[in-house]
Amino acid sequence: MSNYITEEGLLKLKSQMETVRLKLKEVSFKIKEAREMGDLSENAEYHQAKTEQSFLMGKEQEIEQKIKNAEIIEKHSVDVIEVGSFVVIDDDGEKMEYQIVGSDEADPVNGRISLDSPIGASLIGRKKGDTIEVKTPAGVSKCKILSVK
């Protein structure tokens, strides 16, 4: 399964991976120190460090998978909306501008919507001038596509 992502998003993932790996080294050191204290059955620091290590290892695998499946958003058509497109729509009289991105980079407050969101999915494959209906929890909304960049 592809993980659509911008170049900037991929750099952020790689930075997160570095941070997780540094934390894993720190936790490994904590575990080693706790083992040297003796009886592990009643050593809270040891058990806490093992729990943290397990969490970090899971996070590392998750990020590795996202990086492995990364598909960089590069070129996009100015005619047809696809991942990476910037779109201006008229949503019941209100102009809204969005960039269609992969789910990892979605940030609706800042105008970055996931291609998996109701509006993102409705926009994919459409053109300037099209009117779409978007089913949301609040009901059905009609939006006109004003521009595609």
Image (spheres, rainbow, N blue to C red):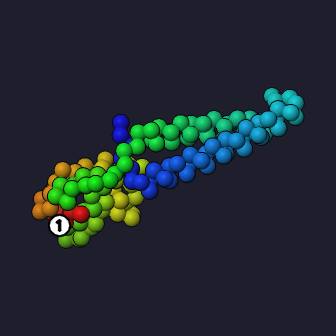
| Disc 1: CA contacts within 10 A as few (<14), some (14-19) or many (>=20) | some
Which residue appears at 72% of the width and 44% of the height?
Answer: 26
Vertical comparison of 69 with 132: above or below: above
Q: In which quarter of the image is the N terminus?
A: top left
Quarter assignment of residue 25: top right
Question: Which amino acid type corresponds to the residue marked 1 in the rendered image?
Answer: Leu
Q: What element carries label 1?
A: strand
Quarter assignment of residue 81: bottom left
Which residue reaches farthest front?
75
Which residue appears at 74% of the width and 35% of the height?
Answer: 47
Vertical comparison of 125 with 51: above or below: below
Visible in this render: residue 136? no
Q: Mark 1 points at which residue?
A: 146
Q: Quadrant of the C terminus?
A: bottom left
Is 13 on the left or on the right of 75, as rendered?
Answer: right
Give whichever of 84, 51 is nearer the camera: 84
x and y percentages locating residue 20 in the rendered image: 61, 45
Is 18 on the left or on the right of 46, as rendered?
Answer: left
x and y percentages locating residue 9 in the rendered image: 44, 53
Is 149 on the left or on the right of 10, as rendered?
Answer: left
x and y percentages locating residue 55 in the rendered image: 61, 38
Quarter assignment of residue 128: bottom left
